[in-house]
Image: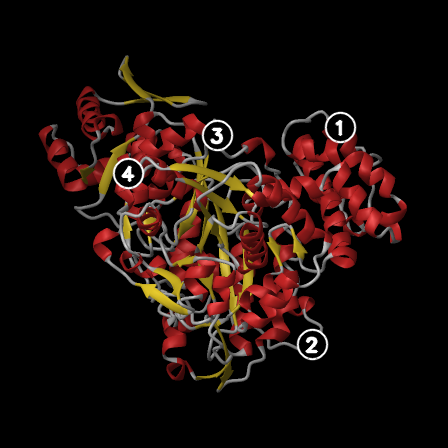
Amino acid sequence: MKTLLVTPPFSQLNTPYPATCYLTGFLRSKGHNVEQYDLGIDVINAIFSKKGLNKIFDTISIGRLGALSTIYIETIEPVIQFLKGKNPTLANRIVNMDYLPQSDRFDNLDITSFGTLGLQDHARYLATLYLNDIGDYITTYIDPDFGFSRYSEKLGIAASFKSVISRIEGDKTLISQFILDKWTEKISKDNFDLIGITIPFPGNLLSSLLMAKQCKKDNPKSKVVIGGGWVSTELRTLTESRLFNYVDYVILDDGEAPLEILLSHLNGEIPKKELLRTYYVINGEIQYSGENVSKNYHLNDLPAPDYKGLNLEQYISLLDTVNPMHSLWNNGRWNKLTLAHGCYWKRCAFCDTTLPYIRDFHQSNAKTVVDKIETIMAETGQSGFHFVDEAAPPVLLKELSLELIRRGLNISWWTNIRFEKTFTQGLAQLMALSGCIGVSGGVEVASDRLLKLMDKGVTVDQVTNITAALGSQGIMVHAYLMYGFPTETKQETIDALEVVRQLFSLDLIQSAYWHQFSLTAHSPVGQAPGKFGLTITGPTFEGFTKNDLEFDSEIDSSPEIFSKGLSTSLYNYMHGNGLDAPLSTWFNFSIPKTKVKKNYISQIIGESEVELKDTTQIIWTGIKIEYINSHLLCYDRTSQEKLKISTKEWLFIDELITATSFRNSCIKTLIQIDSIAKKHAIDLDDWLANDSAALLFSYGLIII
């Protein structure tokens, strides 16, 4: 039995969306014949080619792009090759500003914003503007639903399947024809028994169902199954049988075990009633085979994601901002890996905490994760990793960092965290040594009252001190921000903006994104709206999607009026502009005066102290120390220093370093170190405050 797993248009340009890689690795480990395919990146490459742009401009040639269509057609393939890293010398022509045709995206270009960007990134930024100009042209004149990372996104949140059917069965746009042409080309080459389509986002629904319909037409014997994040969130109460005119099965939540069991069924080994978390139809009636937790797999039991079969050279790295943290999502080829399933906190009131992808928490161990990292690096030749956790557990990050350092693996990685107190400067130092370059995390409303109401489990003080610790080690921070949370007042929204301004001004965060609160059926607020002063008003469930809810609030703070001002201020802050400007600068209406003191955040940093306890851990991660001619010599990659010490102190230091060395997998507590100090007649408290301790701390001794 042959299976094809597909990523539909459109999700990511710079790296494969990981779902098919996870499932392919698992099914291949079980002996199944599996192929994977990223239709999205193939379609993007088809559109943004000479042949593709000829079709675009043959359909309609209008305005500035129409007038310059010949130039766009001549330059598109060299530029795409450059964005794939295959044509680096083109950068010299691009930055000269007379090679690329320019339209609206170049209108407000400020070359001073390039700062210290190197030649390649400077050119990549300009090439991204060029590509976005073409994308805007397509959206305006060809297909308003087109986007580089989404297609007909609004259709994916439609309550009624009727509107979806009208798009599937209606006239095809040029973009949907591009999709179907590439898809037909793929499925005509082979007969697949099972075609699995992941639908991670609402902007993947239309293309997925267009693909499914084409399968039924061209390969009627092929079975089609859909799953993924959007399916598992939106279709949990599915009663719309017309969906099964296009697909045969709908799987919820983690796909490994359900797909394995589905393949057993299709092989005639088990009946349909034994399927797992799967919808199907019998005699026009929807059936659901529910949960059986004993059949689920733990992360430790799953193999590494398998990238074989994906053409990694086809991916396109864009640079749509000169902000280095914000650009991570679209720039560079990142291998995706999960450290922990679900969220260990799972209490935030706005989050889908009742769903398994949040609720069911379990984590890998560090050695298993690093084994997978080594496997993926060998397969892809890439050493960049994005750990795609809901919230990476700090204890696991400590163990992971140590394991990476022990094995001498040189990787770059970033992940999502909660701003927990356990993210000390020592842990940040350990993470940075292991290759951590950035983290993202929820600052949300930046108000202690609202953070408590939403049960976030963090405070503004925590956020400040943790971002300071991370920043001290060169780890960039992206903050997720929220406005319009239930009971939030206009005053609190402006005060939150002032907190954010101060965080940027002190370089505690480097990137951020505001989003307006949305109410979902699977969140604590959605489960108990009255507790938060909300009344649910819709939409009426029509058998298809159910997640986003409409509501009235007891407090009408009209959060939508702040949207443009918050976004504009944030864009400027991320580029180092307007940090001293009054908050009123960003709004075209009167706003409350902030009640937040101008030195609020800086005072928090000044008041923070590291508290040492007997259980505080200490580890040596340094490169080399020696004792020569009564001097302690310390070495690192870029420098060396020496300090005169006694032989007695050296003997203590030598034993301390041996006892705490990461190479020996040793982490000692301060009370254990105190025992070593006493053996050498050293007062540990006094020693921790002296020059030799300070020198060792600067060369690799870490307190966690």
The x, y position of residue 685, in whole percent, is 20, 41
Rendered image quadrant of residue 456: bottom left
Instruction: Identify the amino acid type marked 3.
Output: Gln
> What kind of residue is marked 2?
Phe
Which residue is disc 2 drawn over? Answer: 589
Q: Is residue 622 left or right of residue 385?
A: left
Disc 1: which residue: 92
Q: Mark 4 or 1 closer to N-term? A: 1
Out of 313 and 394, give the one closest to the viewer: 313
Counting residues from the N terminus, which is met first, the one under dot 1 or under dot 2? 1
Give the alpha-carbon distance from disc 4 to disc 2, as whole Å. Answer: 52 Å
Q: Quadrant of the C terminus?
A: top left
Disc 1 residue type? Asn
Q: List the residue tagged with mark 3.
A: 382
Q: Nearer the viewer, residue 306 or 224?
A: 224
Between disc 4 and disc 2, whose residue precedes? 4
As measured in the structure, the alpha-carbon distance from the residue carrying label 2 to the one carrying label 3 is 49 Å
Comes first in the chain, label 4 or label 3: 4
Measure how far apart labels 4 and 3 are at the Cα level.
20 Å
Place of residue 214 in the rendered image (x, y in percent of width and height, measured from the top left) = 58, 52
Q: CA distance from mark 1 to mark 2?
A: 45 Å
Q: Position of residue 550 (x, y in %)?
A: 51, 78
Residues at discs 4 and 2 in contact (Cβ within 8 Å): no
- Are discs 3 and 1 less than 8 Å apart at CB? no
Instruction: Determine the residue located farthest toward the right in the rendered image.
Output: 67
Can the viewer see residue 403? yes
**Would residue 702 be seen by someone viewing this image from the given angle?**
no
